[in-house]
Amino acid sequence: MKLFIYLAGLILSNLSYSALAQSIDTNLVTNLDGKHAIENLRNARYLFNKEIIKNRKAELSYLPKPEYIFNKSGEQTFTFKDIKFLFKDKKIVSINGIMASPEILATLTNELMILDKQQCFFTEKSNQEYLKANRNLNYIVTADRNFFSSLSILNATVEEIATIAKQNTSKIAFELGLAKMRLPKANNFLSDKDLKSQALVAK
């Protein structure tokens, strides 16, 4: 019963993301709608939790698959607000055709990759807990909350970068805009131990 109550709370906080998730294999696609890719991951977890509440049981065969968005080898282009982010071997090469300084691109790459690793980490940890005979419900809920939070921060970050890189923005204006931007504190990556501590506090 506790699981249903916890998941109901999560679903109520994510009602705006109720569209049906569609699977995307970013290894086979080089030009993707970035916002759509993020929403697919978010919706997969949202619908899984919704089904648990509806059917009063977890269909483990439908556990959302942990998946990276940006953290993949090869060359990929993600579009956010009509602005193209070009990634090559897990590094940002350009944004809307703007070749910013290596230092700035490295900083942006680091922040986005950490957030991407976080959302995948939390999905994996939630799934692992579901597969245990004696599930820690607080742990699952805490992992799910951190998953949704990581995706939300990731989406907000790339959209802000896209706004700065709007059409006809010069390299100088772009770099000045990024210098004023407050990047999330993504370096505080939670370990499994930290996640368990959060779950204990949530009891």
Image (tube, grey):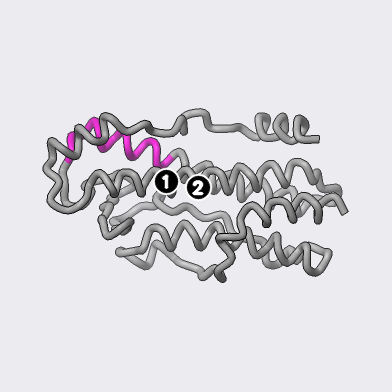
Residue 158 drawn at (x, y percent): 36, 47
Which type of secondary structure does the marked residue at label 2 adopt?
Answer: helix
Q: Find numbered disc 1 in the image and state the secondary structure of the residue it sits on.
A: helix
In which quadrant of the rendered image does the N terminus lie?
A: bottom right
Does the CB distance between marks 1 and 2 fall below 8 Å?
A: yes
What residue range appears in magenta?
100-113
Q: Is-magenta flag for residue 191? A: no
Q: Residue at x 58, y 32 (%)?
A: 190
Q: Quadrant of residue 15?
A: bottom right
Q: Which mark is residue 152?
A: 2
Compared to residue 37, the image places residue 108 above or below, namely: above
Main SS, magenta region, reads helix
In screen coordinates, is 113 left or right of 189?
A: left
The numbered disc on residue 156 is: 1
Question: Percent position (x, y) of residue 192?
Answer: 65, 35
How far, Cα to Cα, is label 1 from label 2?
6 Å
Which amino acid lies under the numbered mark 1 shown in the image of this protein? Ala
Would residue 64 appear left or right of 53 to someone viewing this image?
left
